């Protein structure tokens, strides 16, 4: 089987990554299989502790390998765009993009399997059918889905070559001083808290463009454009600058009086070349209910 690593999995241990995709194999068994050459990364055998990178090509032949069985579920999809090769969905806040080892139901993939069955790309395995890129559970907004492997490779190439314009809207704590700003700081795994990312020396080059939309008494409404797409990039960059995303308890904001499902962050704009065409697809969605709720709360505080 072949898996391509996306930006959200980089800096994860190879054995941990494979454990998230397999069922019925212990970590020790996986480590032994990796050491015995049943797993290669870009054609080369690696140690179980190898930290995978974005776009790594992982090939594995595990005799006892079993894919995690994912059940289709009749969950409503907000489809913003669709053609024969792909679709773009508006993922709600609170929904996982794809199943995890300990959570196999209620995800976007469960919903996609119900509607499209086998008519989804499988480059990244059964767990991630159709998924080209991801949004965090509590980040809402636009996600591209590939219906076949040729389209998946095309879209993944656009991401890799920075040919997709992705914009987010967010609310941050504090009054952001500059009307426009560029944050260019390297991001890597947090040195002492591996479930988090951080600005670290030797991390991946990461660039975020900031534009102020509206300032409130003690918060700011921002439009954010991603030049790179590192794990938790917006949340990490803004927290590092002292302006954590509203209700982002992982990166220091704490939960405010107006409660939401964690961070107030929405992917609201996508522009990219339509697969196998000379045309462009440009999509914009309105603020979701979580975003509107927080903006109303902040306006009433003025």
Image: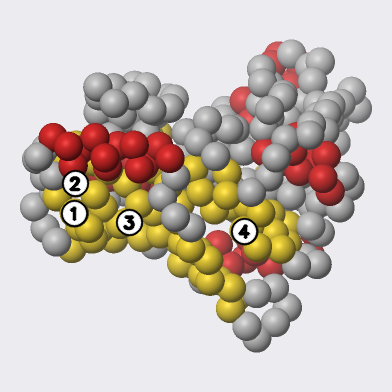
Q: Is residue 189 left or right of residue 240?
A: right
Task: Indicate which label's residue lies in the foreground, 4 or 3.
Answer: 4
Q: Is residue 156 left or right of residue 125?
A: left
**Mark 4 surroundings within 10 Å by alpha-carbon count, few (fewer than 14), some (14 through 19), many (20 or more):** some
Q: CA distance from mark 2 to mark 4?
A: 28 Å
Q: Which residue is mark 3?
A: 224
| Residue 20 in view in this figure | no
Tell me the element at label 3: strand
Q: Is residue 42 left or right of residue 13?
A: right
Could you tell me if the residues under marks 1 and 2 are in contact, i.e. CB atoms within 8 Å? yes
Tell me the element at label 2: strand
Dot placed on the residue nearer the N-terminal end, 2 or 4: 4
Could you tell me if the residues under marks 2 and 3 are in contact, i.e. CB atoms within 8 Å? no
Quarter of the image where the N terminus is located: top right
Q: Which residue is mark 4?
A: 80
Using the rendered view, name the quadrant where residue 235 is placed. top left
Q: CA distance from mark 1 to mark 3?
A: 13 Å
- The residue positioned 44% from the left and 45% from the top of the image is 288
Task: Indicate which label's residue lies in the foreground, 2 or 3.
Answer: 2
């Amino acid at each position: 089987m072949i898996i391509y690593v996306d930006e959200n999995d980089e800096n994860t241990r190879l054995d941990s990554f494979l454990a998230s995709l397999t069922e019925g194999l212990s970590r020790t068994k996986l480590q032994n299989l990796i050491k015995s050459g049943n797993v290669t990364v870009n054609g080369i055998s690696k140690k179980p502790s190898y930290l995978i990178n974005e776009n790594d090509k992982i090939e594995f032949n595990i005799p006892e390998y079993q894919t995690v069985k994912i059940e289709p579920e009749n969950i409503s999809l907000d489809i913003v765009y669709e053609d024969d090769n792909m679709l773009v969905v508006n993922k709600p806040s609170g929904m996982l993009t794809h199943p995890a080892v300990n959570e196999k139901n209620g995800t976007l993939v469960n919903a996609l399997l119900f509607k499209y069955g086998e008519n989804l790309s499988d480059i990244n395995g059964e767990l991630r059918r159709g998924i080209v890129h991801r949004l965090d559970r509590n980040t809402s907004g636009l996600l591209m889905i590939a219906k076949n492997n040729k389209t998946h490779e095309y879209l993944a190439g656009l991401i890799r070559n920075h040919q997709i314009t992705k914009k987010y809207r967010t609310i941050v704590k504090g009054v952001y001083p500059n009307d426009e700003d560029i944050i260019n700081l390297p991001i890597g795994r947090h040195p002492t808290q591996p479930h988090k990312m951080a600005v670290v020396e030797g991390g991946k080059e990461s660039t975020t463009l900031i534009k102020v939309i509206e300032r409130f008494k003690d918060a700011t409404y921002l439009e954010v454009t991603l030049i790179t797409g590192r794990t938790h990039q917006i949340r990490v960059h803004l927290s590092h600058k002292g302006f954590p995303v509203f209700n982002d308890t992982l990166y220091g904001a704490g939960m405010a009086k107006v409660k939401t499902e964690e961070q107030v962050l929405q992917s609201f704009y996508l522009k990219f070349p339509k697969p196998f065409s000379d045309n462009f697809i440009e999509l914009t969605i309105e603020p979701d209910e979580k975003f509107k709720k927080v903006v109303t709360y902040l306006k009433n505080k003025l």
